[in-house]
């Protein structure tokens, strides 16, 4: 949420942060994408109101992993959990080939969200230059929080991000939102 | 980087330890060979270092001849619960003798005391028991009875458990679950592989547990099955974990690691080979190998904080301090201690030029702002009574030491101080030290030439008088210095400085400023302004006259200065002054009190008589002829050598015959006799003229 990004090592287990958004407390989990943490990721996704599924736009594998794992991750999340699909590392596109088309991403986005939405929650971001990153979170907060009535204002909305970056490029920068 | 949170101190030696229990100074060891030993711990403090010694008190050999798996003292009931050979039995706490006729629970895998019981009663405790089959039960234990209250089926035998209220968190063969005795609901948490993970479950606080998870992670979970803290990263081969606020200690086969629950970071590692048991008993931490018992003595929280600060680990120190509230300080003591730490932390941030953090901490720690000012050479006035806090809040000599001669850095430090002082000035806290704050601000403004200098000087301030004047002088802030005197009632000094201003822009700016306040004072700036060989256009009298024309008193004073003091021969000045004088006289004509009028007329006639440089015609025609200013009119006619008209006025309008005669003499002075005769003749003919009477 700081909008700026540091070079980070891999997430071990999960990274957690709490942010204020207006009168809301937003709990954000950044969970590890590695297979061995998969069981834990599902645990962290329990009761989540929103999830961000991030993949590396230059890696087809990362997109497929996302597809393969999303069901188990989301089984304990809220039934109307908002799932935002995020293509990361778009700053690499001039020099690297795009491995995942927008169409494929949009199809996945549609599959993941059962609730009707005006706009499909798909974003192309770069954590390196901050492109669209804040937008992703604002989109989520607006979607999830504007519908709640005022009495619920102080309830904590849990949001989980699942980071499925390809392990082939470990020096990538990573969103620490 | 690490902090020393615990010292490892040997307490006693005993073989084949399987489990430990402790209450007060009583230490109980359960052994592999069915013994229970009771020791009294003696703690001695010598030269600041603590030593422990265990005095053996009693022992008992259990008939089962199997390992003593768990011991739990219920001191309020004077009972000890012991798990051995799958049976929980009740013993006397003091003698460790069995209670005859007491209930036993069989087929037990493990049990745990409920520290947050469903029914709290002084005559009973609650335990949760995992049977070797597939269920977990909650019992109420009295002096001699254990009564089943609730039961949950877990479908698999439990390997570890912890309880809080109605919630029980259990490690089963391949996963963790949380059950609720009141609702019967069982919630799955996450799976684990027994080959790789030794299941550990401990209670952290109300409705929160900590579990060992794959990847040597410590996972926090709330009773609702969600996690609200990031995990801890432990090492492999975990044996047991305990929590003593704010630390989580984990024992593995080689180390005891200490993590903070506050930031989930590892704080200390104690090498400890062959660890067997680790227990926390009302804050006392006991760790054993198979044969030795050690006490983990907490290092005083203040020492830990000091150590963190010494390492510049400010946020950790603050976080630790903030959570030290539980360490038995009163609220006031705590607040005092915490502020002190905030300030120490603030000075560390300050010395590292982390100004945002420093600002916040100075503010929150309610800094005596003089501590900060005193780091800047020559800013604290000599008249201040300030001495630095003892014990010191920092080890900084001054900002020059911090900046190491880097002028950019020095400036950054000064900018910070300015910002801080501006923030604190005028607040209740600032009021107490107004002298130091205002003086420091003035000096900083003066040095940097900021416009706020004038604002500060022109408003109420508590600046040190001598030092500020000296500083302004030294910094060449002449205008500010003049203002300084002006606002302290020393107009003379102020005007003297202003008139010396070489910066004409400033001078002009201040002329208007002073003229608006006092025309008489303002005009003195010009009158006192030193004459130069080459005068700039703006300082030429014509231009000055033009500039001050909207200030009538100043204008008159300046023209008088030009004519009478400087002896200016310029016609325009003389005429201008005469016109102004005439206007003054006319203005006073209707006054009932004639005093002003008389004075004004004296001035006017003096000028008219003494000066030969004004335009007589203009004055006569425009201003005087058709008025009742007869004496003045007479003077003007005289200047024009129209003696008849002059005398006519004196005689017929003023009936002042002696004046008329005096006129004749004055007018003919220095002239020949014929001239004088002519003038007297004129007078005579006027006398002889047939008058109205």
Image (spheres, grey):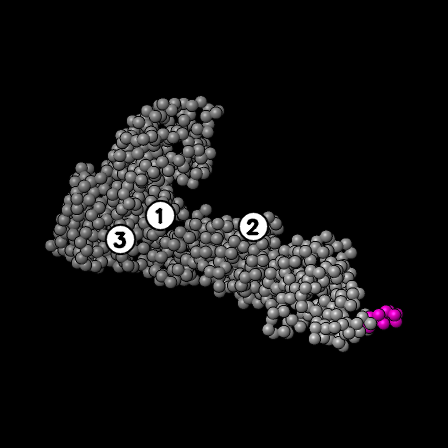
Identify the residue at horizontal 45%, vertical 59% (top origin).
B366
Q: Name the residue under label 2.
A: B412
Q: What is the C-alpha distance between the residues marked 3 and 1?
A: 24 Å
Labels 3, 1: one chain: yes
| Of the pair B64 and B366, the residue shown nearer to us | B366
**Which residue occupies the extreme left position in the image?**
B101
Q: Along the horizontal axis of the image, is B137 left or right of B481?
A: left
- Snapshot quadrant of residue B579: bottom right
Mark 1 or 2, closer to the camera: 2
Residue B261's mark? 1
Residue B313: x and y, percent? 46, 49
Label located before the other in sequence (3 or 1): 3
Label located before the other in sequence (1 or 2): 1
Residue B131's x, y, as percent?
17, 43
* B80 relative to B292 in the view: left or right: left
Q: Which residue is drawn at 47% across and 50% down?
A: B357
């Amino acid at each position: 949420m700081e909008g700026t990004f540091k070079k980070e090592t891999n997430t071990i287990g999960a990274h957690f942060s709490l942010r204020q958004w207006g009168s809301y407390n937003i709990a954000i989990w950044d969970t590890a994408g590695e297979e061995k943490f998969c069981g834990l990721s599902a645990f962290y996704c329990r009761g989540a109101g929103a999830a961000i599924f991030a993949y590396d736009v230059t890696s087809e594998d990362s997109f497929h992993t996302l597809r393969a794992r999303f069901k188990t991750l989301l089984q304990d999340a809220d039934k109307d959990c908002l799932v935002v699909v995020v293509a990361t590392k778009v700053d690499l596109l001039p020099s690297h080939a795009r491995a995942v088309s927008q169409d494929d991403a949009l199809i996945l986005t549609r599959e993941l969200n059962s609730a009707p939405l005006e706009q499909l929650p798909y974003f192309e971001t770069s954590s390196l230059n901050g492109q669209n990153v804040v937008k992703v979170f604002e989109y989520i907060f607006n979607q999830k929080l504007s519908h709640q009535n005022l009495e619920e204002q102080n309830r904590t909305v849990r949001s989980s991000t699942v980071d499925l970056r390809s392990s082939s490029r470990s020096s990538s920068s990573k969103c620490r939102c | 980087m690490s902090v020393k949170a615990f010292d490892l101190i040997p307490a006693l030696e005993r073989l084949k330890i399987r489990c430990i229990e402790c209450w007060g100074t009583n230490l109980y060891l359960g052994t592999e060979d069915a013994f229970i030993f009771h020791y009294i711990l003696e703690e001695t403090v010598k030269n600041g270092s603590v030593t422990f010694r265990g005095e053996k008190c009693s022992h008992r050999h259990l008939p089962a001849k199997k390992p003593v798996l768990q011991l739990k003292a219920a001191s309020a009931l004077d009972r000890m619960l012991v798990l051995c050979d799958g049976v929980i039995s009740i013993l006397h706490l003091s003698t460790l003798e069995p209670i005859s006729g007491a209930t036993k629970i069989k087929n037990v895998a493990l049990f745990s005391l409920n520290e947050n019981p469903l029914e709290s009663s002084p005559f009973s405790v609650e335990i949760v028991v995992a049977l070797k089959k597939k269920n977990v039960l909650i019992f109420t234990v009295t002096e001699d009875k254990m009564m089943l209250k609730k039961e949950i089926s877990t479908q698999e035998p439990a390997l570890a458990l912890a309880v809080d209220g109605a919630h029980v968190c259990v490690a089963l063969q391949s996963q963790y679950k949380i059950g609720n005795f009141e609702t019967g609901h069982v919630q799955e948490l996450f799976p684990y592989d027994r080959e790789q993970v030794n299941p550990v479950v401990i209670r952290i606080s109300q409705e929160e547990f900590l579990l060992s998870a794959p990847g040597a992670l410590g996972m926090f979970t709330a009773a609702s099955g969600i996690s609200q803290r990031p995990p801890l990263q432990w090492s492999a081969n975990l044996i047991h974990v305990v929590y003593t606020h704010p630390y989580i200690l984990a024992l593995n086969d080689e180390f005891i690691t200490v993590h903070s629950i506050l930031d989930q970071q590892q704080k200390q590692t104690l090498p400890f080979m062959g660890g067997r048991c680790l227990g926390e008993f009302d804050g006392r931490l006991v760790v054993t190998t198979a044969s030795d018992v050690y006490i983990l003595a907490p290092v005083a929280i203040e020492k830990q904080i000091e150590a963190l600060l010494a390492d510049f680990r400010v946020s950790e120190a603050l976080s630790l301090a903030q959570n030290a509230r539980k360490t038995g300080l009163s609220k006031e003591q705590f607040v005092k201690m915490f502020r002190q730490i905030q300030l120490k932390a603030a000075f560390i941030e300050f010395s590292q030029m982390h100004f945002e953090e420093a600002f916040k901490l100075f503010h929150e720690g309610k800094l005596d702002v003089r501590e900060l000012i005193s780091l800047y050479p020559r800013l604290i006035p000599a008249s201040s009574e300030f001495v630095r806090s003892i014990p010191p809040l920092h080890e900084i000599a001054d900002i020059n030491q911090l900046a190491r001669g880097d002028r950019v850095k020095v400036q950054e430090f000064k900018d910070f101080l300015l910002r801080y002082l501006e923030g604190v000035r005028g607040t209740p806290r600032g009021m107490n030290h107004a002298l130091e704050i205002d003086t420091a601000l003035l000096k900083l403004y003066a040095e940097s030439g900021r416009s706020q200098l004038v604002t500060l000087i022109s408003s109420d301030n508590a600046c040190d008088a001598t030092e500020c004047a000296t500083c302004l002088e030294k910094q060449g802030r002449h205008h500010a210095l003049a203002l300084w005197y002006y606002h302290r009632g020393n107009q003379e000094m102020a005007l003297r400085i202003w008139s010396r201003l070489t910066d004409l822009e400033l001078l002009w700016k201040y002329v208007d400023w002073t003229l608006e306040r006092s025309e008489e004072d303002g005009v003195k700036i010009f009158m006192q302004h030193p004459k130069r060989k080459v005068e700039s256009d703006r300082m030429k009298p014509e231009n000055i006259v033009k500039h001050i024309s909207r200030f009538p008193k100043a204008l008159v004073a300046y023209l008088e200065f030009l004519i009478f003091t400087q002896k200016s021969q310029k016609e325009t000045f003389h005429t201008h002054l005469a016109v102004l004088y005439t206007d003054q006289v006319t203005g006073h004509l209707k006054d009932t009190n004639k005093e002003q009028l008389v004075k004004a007329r004296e001035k006017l006639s003096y000028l008219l008589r003494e000066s030969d440089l004004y335009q007589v015609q203009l004055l006569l025609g425009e201003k005087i002829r058709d008025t009742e200013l007869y004496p003045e009119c007479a003077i003007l006619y005289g200047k024009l050598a129209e003696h008849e008209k002059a005398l006519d006025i004196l005689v017929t309008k003023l009936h002042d015959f002696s004046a008329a005669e005096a006129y004749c003499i004055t007018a003919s002075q220095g002239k020949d006799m014929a001239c004088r005769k002519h003038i007297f003749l004129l007078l005579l003919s006027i006398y002889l003229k047939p008058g109205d009477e």
